[in-house]
Image: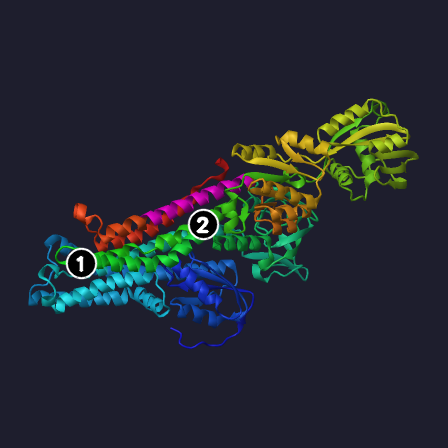
């Protein structure tokens, strides 16, 4: 134990401490409070399920450890340089602690089980002769050795809590087992001082309780280990090495040695090592491990690649843009860990109860003992001892402290596996209560990238030998170099059809003129071309004939028609639309089937908005909405009593995402939108919303089950331990049974939380 406070370098930003000795929910508050009192600490959050504390700020590292030790616990600094090392370090520490608990359990039960069997078989565990005094004295010494070696951590923890004027689970165990042993030794040394009927020893109870609680802690630790599976899988996505090009040679180096702007080679079947931008080659990359989407994504020069994804076909070179802890994968792992560490509001209730629970139980134990001493049958002192010990043992709030963090860890890990990143526990809980879901249109319901959908060529142009390909090539020649979204759609269509603007027929545009708000004008091969909207055609007296009706039909289908004329004669209509995502209709239907009010907000015109809303089955929509008006619409819905979820992908959605009860960002959208949101949908699919809500509801349901089980266990167990059933049925709970029940209640909570690992969100 540290007795002086050493001075070392100050920590910067954030560190992680590994905690040993924390055994119940009330420990969390004590440890966090102790650390927060250290100068320079900005924030301290303990993950009770993992027994770690994340500390941010500037402070002396040893001062933090000293503060934890002063509070009655042990702490060590995590020296891991990356998430994999941190996990390995934690697993090694857990394994060492697990082996110690098993050793302690074996030692305690090696004494306790034979004693209990002897008592059951003979029924004689009393002191009535000198020989029995000697025999039980030896047993008492052996029990003391069990207490020293197997139960030492309970008594040290209780002593530290006492020095800090507080109480925890260790206090209850130490008082219960210590009282049983002391009473038994009084019986051994001075049996005449105790009534004949009360000359019973409880050495087996002390040994059995210590053994069973150590067994329960070991089983809990073993079960807890499975909750890190999501983190393990995410870490496992990143390769150990990368092939970089340096000095004209390709060499394999450790992933930690890859530097910003390094050129990295990835061959077919290999994992992308860091984030980057393709500089050479063409391939298809499987991004399903991060996004959940099964189809490989085509990548060529200029496209971004993400660490952890798998290169399927071609060999590519890419320039490293984000390395180490800055990669998207590292950011995802960090987000998942932070979310697992956070507490939903329902969890804070358990923490608050745990803080007052232990002192209340100690008072109940004293009162029950006094009642038995004054009103109990002969020998009253024996009954008082048994009831007080049993109350202390059975009331340990281990299960209560585990109820929330275990479910949160598994639930958020499960969401991460489905491509849904939940930032914190509060968002996890609130998502289950959403009554109205507001959806942005462009990039959320739709792809966000306009595409050419229709090319209608006039009969007169067909007669002249102009077909769809030629028309598209002419349009691309006119729009070549433009960054307008509609122009980009034209260029994308030519790429898909392997048409090169200005080359297929040696077309070359001259006398180019942009007409703002209308379109463009140019000369190609001595012919005057106009390309733009209906206003452009009308202002140049172009006869549109029956193509106006066709254009209106296209507009009704949420398509934007653009007219092309050659030498003042209508040549074609090219329609461009922002296609609806393949799964948007099914996802919206899924939300509506779950009783949710779905509303669409868009800055687009009303006709297009109406067409899209009709296609996807949305009855409520608001069109021509400015960015600042989006947040106002969300607030209007909140004023109506709705719990509002907002989903968007762009900078214009950020204010609405921030003001909503829960903000959902499309993972393929802007960083600003993602940072403003509570939940990120990595897949870019609206099914992610339904998955997130389903997982949220399942996790909250699991937490409530755990809390109910823990509360009922204590509420029902304490009165029985105090002896309320004795007057009616003559039943008095044995302290050994109480110890076993207390230990296994924690295991039950952990096991129930792990059931979430088998939850299938897509079925809800």
* Residue at the image point whose x is 45% and y is 42% from the top: 698
* Residue at the image point whose x is 59% and y is 56% from the top: 242
> What secondary structure is marked by label 1?
helix
As drawn, is 371 to the left or to the right of 558? left
Residue that mark 2 sits on? 346
Residue that mark 1 sits on? 374
Q: Is residue 608 magenta?
A: no
Looking at the picture, how far across and down is residue 403, in whole percent?
Answer: 39, 50
What is the quadrant of residue 687 in the picture? top right
C-alpha span from label 1 to label 2: 41 Å
Task: Give the colouring mode of the picture.
Answer: rainbow
**Nearer the observer, 277 or 155:** 155
Looking at the picture, how far across and down is residue 382, in whole percent?
Answer: 16, 59
Q: Residues within 10 Å of mark 1 (few under 14, many from 20)?
A: few
**Nearer the observer, 262 or 135:** 135
**Nearer the observer, 487 or 469:** 487
């Amino acid at each position: 134990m540290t007795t002086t406070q050493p001075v070392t370098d100050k920590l910067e930003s954030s560190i992680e401490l590994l905690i040993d000795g924390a055994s119940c929910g009330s420990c969390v508050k004590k440890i966090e409070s102790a650390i927060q009192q250290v100068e320079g600490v900005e924030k301290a959050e303990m993950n009770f399920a993992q027994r770690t504390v994340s500390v941010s700020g500037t402070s002396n590292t040893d001062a933090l450890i000293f503060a934890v030790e002063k509070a009655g616990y042990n702490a060590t600094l995590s020296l891991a340089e990356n998430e994999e090392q941190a996990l390995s370090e934690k697993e090694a520490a857990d394994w060492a602690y697990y082996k110690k608990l098993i050793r302690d359990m074996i030692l305690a039960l090696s004494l306790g089980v034979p004693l209990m069997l002897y008592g059951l078989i003979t029924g004689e565990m009393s002191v009535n002769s000198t020989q029995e005094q000697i025999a039980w004295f030896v047993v008492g010494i052996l029990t003391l050795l069990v207490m020293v070696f197997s139960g030492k951590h309970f008594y040290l923890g209780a002593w530290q809590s006492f020095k800090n004027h507080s109480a925890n689970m260790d206090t209850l165990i130490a008082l219960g087992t210590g009282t049983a042993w002391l009473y038994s030794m009084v019986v051994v040394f001075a049996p005449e001082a105790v009534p004949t009927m009360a000359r019973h020893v409880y050495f087996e109870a002390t040994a059995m309780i210590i053994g069973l609680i150590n067994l329960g802690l070991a089983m809990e630790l073993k079960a807890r280990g499975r909750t890190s599976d999501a983190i393990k899988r995410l870490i496992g996505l990143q390769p150990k090495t990368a092939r970089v090009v340096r000095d004209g040679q390709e060499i394999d180096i450790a992933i930690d040695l890859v530097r910003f702007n390094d050129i990295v080679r990835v061959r077919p079947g290999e994992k992308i090592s860091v984030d980057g931008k393709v500089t050479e080659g063409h391939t298809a990359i499987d991004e399903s491990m991060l996004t959940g989407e099964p189809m490989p994504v085509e990548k060529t020069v200029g496209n971004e690649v993400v660490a952890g994804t798998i290169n399927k076909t071609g060999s590519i070179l890419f320039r490293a843009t984000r390395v180490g802890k800055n990669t998207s994968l590292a950011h995802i792992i960090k987000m998942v860990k932070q979310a697992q560490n956070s507490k939903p509001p329902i969890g804070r209730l358990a923490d608050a109860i745990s803080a007052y629970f232990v002192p209340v139980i100690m008072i109940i134990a004293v009162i029950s003992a006094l009642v038995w001493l004054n009103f109990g049958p002969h020998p009253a002192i024996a009954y008082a001892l048994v009831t007080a010990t049993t109350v202390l043992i059975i009331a340990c709030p281990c299960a209560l402290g585990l109820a929330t963090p275990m479910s949160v860890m598994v639930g958020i890990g499960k969401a991460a596996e489905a491509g849904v990143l939940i930032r914190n526990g509060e968002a996890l809980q609130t998502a289950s209560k959403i009554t109205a879901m507001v959806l942005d249109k462009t990039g959320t319901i739709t792809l966000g990238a306009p595409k050419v959908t229709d090319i209608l060529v006039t009969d007169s142009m067909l007669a002249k030998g102009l077909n769809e390909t030629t028309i598209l090539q002419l349009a691309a020649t006119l729009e070549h170099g433009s960054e307008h979204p509609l122009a980009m759609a034209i260029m994308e269509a030519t790429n898909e059809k392997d048409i090169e603007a200005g080359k297929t027929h040696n077309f070359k545009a001259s006398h180019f003129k942009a007409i703002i708000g209308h379109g463009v004008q140019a000369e190609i091969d001595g012919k005057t071309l106009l390309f733009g909207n209906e206003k452009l055609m009308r202002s140049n007296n172009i006869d549109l004939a029956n193509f106006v009706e066709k254009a209106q039909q296209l507009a009704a289908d949420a398509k934007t028609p653009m007219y092309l004329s050659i030498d003042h004669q209508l040549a074609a209509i090219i329609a461009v639309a922002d296609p609806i995502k393949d799964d948007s209709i099914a996802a919206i239907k899924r939300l509506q089937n779950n009783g949710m009010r779905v509303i669409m907000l868009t800055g687009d015109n009303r006709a297009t908005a109406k067409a899209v809303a009709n296609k996807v089955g949305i009855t409520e929509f608001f069109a021509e909405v400015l960015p600042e008006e989006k947040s106002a619409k969300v607030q209007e819905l909140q004023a109506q009593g709705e719990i509002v979820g907002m989903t968007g992908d762009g900078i214009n959605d950020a204010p609405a995402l921030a003001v909503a009860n829960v903000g959902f960002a499309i993972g393929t959208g802007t960083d600003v939108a993602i940072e403003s949101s509570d939940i990120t949908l990595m897949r870019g699919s609206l099914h992610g919303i339904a998955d997130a809500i389903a997982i949220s509801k399942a996790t909250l349901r699991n937490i409530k089950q755990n809390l109910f089980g823990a509360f009922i266990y204590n509420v029902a167990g304490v009165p029985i331990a105090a002896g309320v059933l004795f007057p009616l049925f003559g039943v008095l709970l044995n302290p050994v049974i109480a110890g076993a029940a207390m230990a296994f209640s924690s295991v039950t909570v952990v096991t129930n939380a792990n059931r979430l690992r088998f939850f299938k969100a897509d079925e809800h």
